[in-house]
Amino acid sequence: MIIESIFAFLFLAILAVNSLSMVVWLWLHRLVLTSAEMVSAKTARIYTSYLFGSLMKGRLNNSPSMAVAGVPDRDRIVQDVRSSSQYPYVVRLARIAKDLPFNLVSCFLP
């Protein structure tokens, strides 16, 4: 009985951590889509993956987010997303989620 409750608690903790990471990714994706009117779904995923990877770099996830040619921080879409009024909230959520254990979304999504 105790072992089953421990497994249930671990399952709920893993679910909560990964749900928080998915909220960060989806929020960034929505910000990318609203910052550029004519962007394809694939391009929006690339920008979202870049922004998500740069936010989620930390103690557990320090791999490069993507290979780029040029300076991505000078890109208009990246600048628009980072200057939006909702971006500080996304950054706060990412700081909470990035170093939590069992965060599989930040390791496999970008």
Image (cartoon, helix red, strand yellow):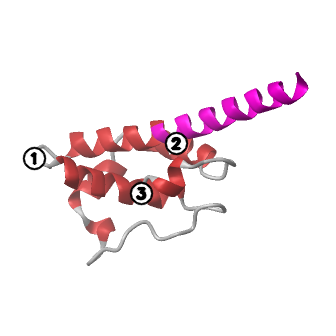
Counting from the top left corner in percent of width and height, residue 70 is at: 26, 78
Q: Which mark is residue 38?
A: 1
The furthest residue to the left: 38
- Tag 2's secondary structure? helix
Q: Residue 97: within the magenta?
A: no
> N-terminal of the two: label 3 or label 1?
1
Q: Which mark is residue 110?
A: 3
Pick the front one: 41 or 1: 1
Pick the front one: 95 or 82: 95
The furthest residue to the top: 1
The residue that appears at 56% across and 40% down in the rendered structure is 18
The residue that appears at 53% across and 34% down in the rendered structure is 19
Counting from the top left corner in percent of width and height, residue 100 is at: 67, 47
- Tag 3's secondary structure? loop
The furthest residue to the right: 2
Nearer to us: label 3 or label 1: 3
Pick the front one: 17 or 51: 17
Left or right: residue 48 versus residue 44 is right
Residue annotated with mark 2: 21
The residue that appears at 38% across and 39% down in the rendered structure is 26
- Dominant secondary-structure state across the stretch colored magenta: helix
Q: Residues within 10 Å of mark 3 (few under 14, many from 20)?
A: some
Q: Are marks 3 and 1 in contact (CB under 8 Å)?
A: no
- CA gap between label 2 and label 1 equals 26 Å
Nearer to us: label 2 or label 1: 2
Residue range in magenta is 1-22
> N-terminal of the two: label 2 or label 1?
2
